[in-house]
Amino acid sequence: MPSPSRALRAATQQLHPIKWSDTLHLPKSAFPARASAADLARFRTRCADDLYAWQRTHRPKDNEFVLHDGPPYANGAVHVGHALNKVLKDVILRWELARGRRVHYRPGWDCHGLPIELKALQQARAQSHAATALDGAPEAEAAAAAAVASGVGMSAGEIRRRARELAAETMEAQKASFRSWGVMGEWERPYQTMEAGFEVRQLGVFREMVGKGLISRHHRPVYWSPSSRTALAEAELEYDEHHKCTAAFVKMPFVRLPEVLRINPAVRPGHISALIWTTTPWTLPANMAVAVKNDIQYMVIELGGEQVVVAKDRVEQVLSHLPAFTTTRTIIENISGAELADGNAACYNLFQGAESRILSADFVTATSGTGLVHMAPGHGMEDYQVCQKHGVGPAFAPVDVDGRYTADVFPADAANASLLGLDVQTDGMKAVLELLASPSQYVSKDLHASGSSLILATHTLTHKNPIDWRTKQPIIVRATAQWFADVSAIQERARASLDDVQFIPESSKSRLNSFLSGRSQWCISRQRAWGVPIPALYHIETGEACITDESIAHIISIVEEKGTDAWFTDPEDAADWLHPSLTPGEWVRGKDTMDVWFDSGTTWTSLPTRNDSQPVADVYIEGTDQHRGWFQSSLLTHIAVQHENSDMDNVKAKAPYGKLITHGFILDAEGKKMSKSLGNVIAPEQIVDGSLLPPVKARKQNGKTAKVKSTAGQVEEKPLFDSMGPDVLRLWVASSDYTSDVSIAVPVLQEVQQALQKYRVTFRWLLGVLADYQPTTTTMQAEQLTFADRAVLHHLSRTSKDVMEAYGDYQFHKAVKGINAFFNNDLSAVYFEICKDGLYTGSQAVRTRTQGVLATILNELLKWLGPLVPHLVEEVWEYMPAAMKMGEDGHPFQRVWSAPFAAGTGDLAGALEVFERLSAGVKLAQEDARRAGHLKSGLNCKVELSGIVPGQVHEWRDELATLLVVSQAGVVRDGDANPTEWRYEQKVGSMIVAVVPPEGHKCVRCWKFTAETNEEPCGDCREVLQEQGLL
């Protein structure tokens, strides 16, 4: 009988010799390098629309998870901030779905309000109806608003029609973008704040708040935007950090001296004034009081013959603004604020020819200004509150809707009208200072004997100043008649409800609490046309407002019939809006609309009813700016309509959300906020199509590179970009720690793209080696597995636990970090390198065992990545071997992830540490051999271990070479090693690792150096060939 070697040589010399590559089991998969646009669209339909519909039918209704969508404004193209927000929501939904829950997500849009109205006005003026052409241009918005408000533009009905069309058009464009990112939800029936049913529900909330006494109308100071001609909420403000203004030290002559000054012979009546400092000199005509603080020490000093009262701690600062040669003299060194505010003292307002009382106010400090504060209750909330407390009023504000002085500003100058019509922040301010510089015509010598300038000094000050969030123009504080919600009445209950809310991050609770604490009144009325009307009627003769429950209920019934547009377009004397108890012809409809934060704050009414133990939504998630916006308005309206201390419901108020998640803003690579003026804005499409990254080299077709004609007619090479689809956008979002501001830059996106590419390459290889895998129902026992199998399953189990915990905590960036580490370290760098030889060249038993491990890994990876990159998971499922799809688990998206994967491999910590140290030592020795030119392939060596070799290594003796990916490996006793041509050693603890030349020849089939000659397979390959029937 011939020997195996002779038989093999004979076989290879037959008419048809063996082609060794045909005997290998190399990966075979049609999984593409990139999915086509058409395929992505198909996968998106399955993993988003179809999946959402499936789970609504198949998941139990009593295990529902509700994520309420904070509505974006329907006024422009989407940006990366939208992507961060929407993708985060979708990852949360998919995680909760993976947990077995039935998820509810109904997207919504904020369709009313100033931003959309101004866009519509700007569009109308430009005679363009393209929503995409409306980005930016704050100055144009301001001009459009002013033009319409001054009668040059359209009627309220026309404005509303155009605004509605713009909102609808933009909503569809935004919706298409959101859906293209694989965000699942009820896209065919989103809620819209301009939808008739929503408006009716909103008016119902308003009616309930009126019934509880929470809504009232007052004449008090509010933030006012002259450029937009409307009141603004605090959430509608931005801040100019570098605003410059003219600050002034102004002398206000005493009309009546406080007793402490009156009895002092050194004080000269007619030559003494209270010295105030203001950054808003334009408000001086509305001055009604001067504030001091009881416990501040003041003094009287003489400056150039004039005496002034100033806080003792501010004298040095005041003098720093005066010429160096100014003479000073102390008249009285110590006077308390309480002595100044003795109830008798008053100063003179030359513009009104009226007295301004000296009052005590706690907000006065001795750390800025002069320690005396000019108070205009019509232009400051703190001023208003102090003056109200002391009976000083009314809140006087001689400024019109355009921010210009009215005729009431300077009655003594009525004939000249020198201030009338001037813009208060520019020419008006200058004119006020000029009048104060020459006051003799308006102030008697009894009060100001010298008749000299009442301006002690002026200087330019740079400070933080509020601006209109749309027009970017400065705002003012102006007293007007507005509708207010009394937040103070529900503030305590609202704050108490937050104790039952989980905050992510935890610090956001104190932020929301702070905003709630600082708010007592919420101005809910706006002087715009595009919004839900405040259902108030006004008596034609008296101006009395009617908001009785009967009247509001009747108006709501008419709105249900006609819609809110009719409120603005019906004839002024239309009687059908009046409740039968009101006399026709005596009442007219108001023109104010509700604050858009009231609109969005009532979006919880669009959610399905739940039992009393659950909040209406499990999660609200929006940007950090919503602590003063949507988070707060939703809480306040929801608390406002709940019962309080009634017989049937004496329970703690409940917030509308069970978990409140806050994400940061998007910044560029330098940490700057994105803005068009800086040119650092990134569109989500640029991330999806890869155009932010350097172009890839164009592949030649028929020997030619793809080219395109330029606009100049020249032929140019067309740059090609590596588009990886929406999953790269999703993975970037998931990789980011959203609890702080998120930076986006090319290096960050390159890392994300490389990670996604790693996923694709890994799945392609796994699908290829599992192409012929036939799953069995028999559970593989641990003793059947190699150490490498048990090690990778151990890592799989550990990572599965970490990933599941990270998902559960909504710390998706930690999940991504763990997943990437497993792909790169445990799979590619270790297990795949170890198992490839057995998969490609090994016996059927070896292949089946390894495929079983890889199939387990593949299914777990799909589970991990499902919430993050659903398009890729859907694509992998499409190319999954049919036999693997037949299991009981079904589609990855339909499986329930109830617990992390458990390997059942026992404690491998010690063994893994030994293996990692051993493997590292071998690689170092191999690198030494490569540098010396003795080693090219890792298989072209043998590993000898000596010294004190750990017991685990002895247990691996049959698979040691496979574990180390070398041709031979073994333990030798000290001194027993045979002399070799070369030898490279590394010390690993007390063990010596030596890399030496292999003992055999290179196998023609597996390439290990274990064959008897260079012309024939090794012994292991011969056994496989016999199994295949080739020998």
Image (cartoon, rainbow, N blue to C red):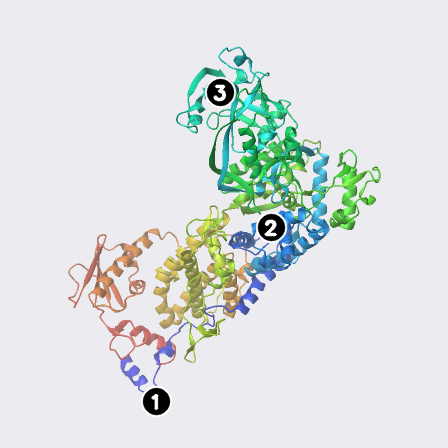
Q: Position of residue 588 (x, y in %)?
A: 78, 41
Q: CA distance from mark 3 to mark 2?
A: 49 Å
First in residue order: circle 1 vs circle 3 = 1
Residue 389 showing in the rendered view: yes
Identify residue type, mark 2.
Answer: Glu
Residue 65 showing in the rendered view: no
Task: Residue under label 1, please give it.
Answer: 15
The crowd level at tag 3 (other Cα within 10 Å; few <14, some 14-19, many 20+) is: some
Vertical comparison of 907 with 352: above or below: below
Task: Residue under label 3, please give it.
Answer: 306
The crowd level at tag 1 (other Cα within 10 Å; few <14, some 14-19, many 20+) is: few
Residue 520 sits in quarter: top right
The residue lying at 47 percent from left, 65 percent from top is 723
Vertical comparison of 412 with 161: above or below: above
Vertical comparison of 323 with 500: above or below: above
Vertical comparison of 1008 with 783: above or below: below
Q: Position of residue 110 (x, y in %)?
A: 63, 50
Identify residue type, mark 1.
Answer: Leu
Q: Position of residue 100 (x, y in %)?
A: 57, 53
Identify residue type, mark 3.
Answer: Glu
In the shown orientation, is residue 966 left or right of residue 264? left
Label 2 residue SS:
helix
In the shown orientation, is residue 130 left or right of residue 572? left
- Tell whether label 2 touches label 3 (CB within 8 Å): no
First in residue order: circle 1 vs circle 2 = 1
Q: CA distance from mark 1 to mark 2?
A: 86 Å
Residue 205 sits in quarter: top right
The mark closer to the camera, 1 or 3, is 3
Label 1 residue SS:
loop
Task: Residue under label 2, please give it.
Answer: 141
Q: Position of residue 47 (x, y in %)?
A: 56, 61
Residue 317 sits in quarter: top left
